[in-house]
Amino acid sequence: MINNTNPLLSDFKTAHGVVPFDKITVNDFEPAILQAIDEHAKEVQHIVAQTALPSFENTIVALERSGSMLERVLGVFYPLLSANADDSLLALSNKLAPIISEHSNSITLNQQLWQRIKFVHEHFKPALFDEEDCMLMRETYKSFVRCGADLSDADREKYRQISLRLTELSLKFEQNELKENSNYKLWLTANDLDGLPESAIEAAQMAAKENGQDGEYLITLHAPSYGPFMKYSSRRDLREKLYRMYNAQCTAGEYSNLQILREIANSRLQLANLLGYKSYADYRLDDTMAKNCHTVYEMLRELRQAYLPVQRKDLDRLRNFASHLEGHHITIMPWDYSYYANKEKEQQYSINDEALRPYFELSAVTKGVFGLATKLYGLKFSENLSAPVYHPEVRVFNVYDYDDSFLGVLYTDFFPRATKQSGAWMTNFREQYVDSSGNDVRPLVTLTMNFTRPTPTKPSLLTFSEVETFVHEFGHALHSLLSKCKYSSLSGTNVHRDFVEMPSQFCENYIYEQEFLDSFAKHYITGESIPQDLIQKLIKSSQYGAAYSCVRQLGFGFIDMAWHTITEPYQGDIFDFENKALSSVKVFEPVHGCIMSPQFGHIFSGGYASGYYGYKWAEVLDADIFSKFKEEGIFNPTTARCLRDSILSRGGTRDAMEMFVNFRGRKPQIDALMKRDGIKS
């Protein structure tokens, strides 16, 4: 029996089905999740108990549509766990994670269900079904095989135990990262602020006040605080101190992730071996656009060969610049790069973030970013002031298509807080799909950021990098909002991991286009448009540091691949392991006590294991796709419609390479990326 008093356990009776956050409490989640698990188990049992011969409809589609109550509850629970998790919600997630994992395993390892799926797969005739049905059949069968369904009884039990342990470890890794990030603080006095712009000083003063220390200044490890300090502070000693704080996160004490990440890597290897793969990377990449480790390493090495010599030349030039600036020889250390690179960039192009900030007031940027979707696809955004929210700072927008049909709801959550993870991401409270009655259920999309907060004297004025982040995540949102699929497991951003970043990174191209910047970049006080010479400087400066950024990203990719191509359990020193992984793309000598892996949430708790290369992979794709827009017009409606129909609306209903070729007319090439970055003329 469904508990009708719990708002999570029945369809949301709200306009467009928005989440009734005003009625939901933390205490509602546990009973809702447990009851939804029970309901889902009954639905699966009903599928396997049928006497009718297994068919695509009564088995594959029935399984796809089962668990709607659980999807609704977890669709709210998981986003809140990242965006607004207090101690009680974190404790609840620790308690429920193994239960949720066990339920998932009970379905994928259900032998009666598996036998039905195998029967349908063996007798499936693709010619009788449409493309999306065929993809659902393939993906369902493959996902069960990849989750151990075809293993022996003993090995299925091993798989169950390993996957349960991995769920617990990943959750612990994530929570340690969240708590550690919030714990580190650099307290300053007025004498420690040399070089910092007014915006950073005011933000530090406000942060100190919020932490009960009026009259002092606080720098945290959150991006809007950490980034400006490393870029502008002339206090090299404090930059070093903050750098070491940031890069020593989760390496010692109560929130250490060292042993946890080692166990995660070893458990993943064990799971992959159980499924017949040499390494976890072999297992994961078998279900990607890249297909195998060789292809990934080939791309990483090709980019390394092209970008590393340029990066080293750039660093030599920066070293000479810094030495000349300081009047004595400077050895560039990792805590120096951002500071001196900003100085050199400012000298070369007479441009800096502080000069740009007044033109990037958040509400104006929001209108501009939304306007990108309007100009490309005809979308319209209308703020929904009556929709309940999970935090007072969250804003809600109804999104409509060019023909005024409803597309979905977009939530925006812009500012850092102690209960929110660092970084920026897009996720859904509800995926898009077509229900059993033929109704197109539209998505509820959320964008979560950590932007510069408004201060008592200024609104939120973004850095150019923050504008870029906004546009990036908005690209993910469009991928979801434009989805036109039958099945939620194939809709929106449910595509190959190494393809999912393409739509978001494609949107980033526009921030270096004058026509786009002109549409929203106005001075927040005077209303004056951003000066044309400033735009030209911005465009000209876009290639500055491209080689450094690429090599840095390659480093992350090599770390990820190193952890997931181990073929024997690793019990050695994690610092040595990471340094060896980075050796071929090393920018700086290793700094004692500093390391990336223990805070590398993307690969140890965020789903990007063996997939971080996907960011560079997607850059190759997005640059190649945007080059077609450059050829035909960056707002060409025919080209935009082709992109929408070929890729953005299709979700994962077609092979990613097929979708790319369908739009571009050929397979991807690296040339467009190298030209965009100034590596190739």
Image (tube, rainbow, N blue to C red):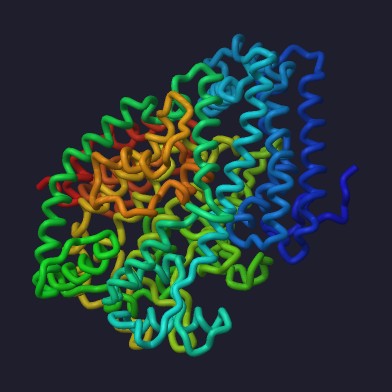
Q: Where 25 sits versus 648, above or below?
A: below
Q: Where 617 sits versus 514, above or below?
A: above
Q: Could you tell me which residue is drawn at 80 percent across and 43 percent down?
A: 34
167 vs 608, left or right, is right
Q: Where 527 sits versus 517, above or below?
A: below
618 vs 166, left or right, is left
298 vs 463, left or right, is left
Residue sitting nearer the eye, 230 or 513: 230
| Quadrant in the rendering for residue 405 | bottom right
Q: Quadrant of the N terminus?
A: top right
Residue 619 image position (x, y, % from top left): 31, 45
Residue 176 image position (x, y, % from top left): 57, 54
Residue 430 image position (x, y, % from top left): 63, 49
| Quadrant in the rendering for residue 101 | top right
| Quadrant in the rendering for residue 576 | top left
Q: Could you tell me which residue is drawn at 47 percent across and 33 percent down?
A: 571
